[in-house]
Image: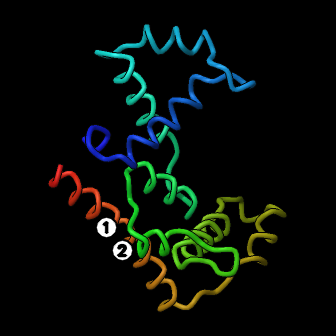
Amino acid sequence: MLVESDKDVVKKLEEFAEKRISDASGNASPKELIRLLLGTGASPRDVMIKRWIDSLEASSAQSAERVSEIASAVGVVSPDLRKRIAPTKSRSSMLEKAFIARNQIAHELDVTKPEEAARKRLESIRQYRNVDVMISLCQEILDVTQDIVNDVVTRVKAA
């Protein structure tokens, strides 16, 4: 597992652990320390790794920010890949544009009864999209996902 061999992944685990056991004032929470020490696992470290994995799996990747968070957690540091994932202040990444379009489409497809007033509002905000643009946005989501997987596989094999 990368958490055993990749310094960037270890750093992310440490950051997660620090936040997880801290209280609002930034001090170690006795309650969280007890949960950690008494948690199910071979060691407190194993308990924390399980909690970290659970937190990463808790919500889906429906934004470029979430993909960036997951990529960081698995140790992706490739500048080219990070640039494709994260938008800058001056420009959106193609991945961010893809998720924006995806979220708009999901809201446009909200299920309503045909007679309801909400339906008319949804019909009025529906956007028509260019098929080629949509294909390229979908392809970007798939390509970035594959590149993250390839990056992780390469590092796991090398470990």
Name the foreground residue: 58 vs 135. 58
Q: Residue at x 48, y 80 (%)?
A: 137
Q: Residue at x 50, y 12 (%)?
A: 35
Q: Residue at x 33, y 16 (%)?
A: 43
Name the foreground residue: 71 vs 30. 30
In percent of width and height, residue 63 lies at: 57, 61
On the image, numbered disc 1 is attached to which residue? 146
In percent of width and height, residue 86 lies at: 55, 69
Badge 2 amino acid: Asp
Quadrant hosting residue 139: bottom left
Quadrant hosting residue 10: top left
Tag 1's secondary structure?
A: helix
Badge 1 amino acid: Gln
Instruction: Decide: is 19 above or below 108.
Output: above
Tag 2's secondary structure?
A: helix
Residue 62 in the figure: left or right of residue 9: right
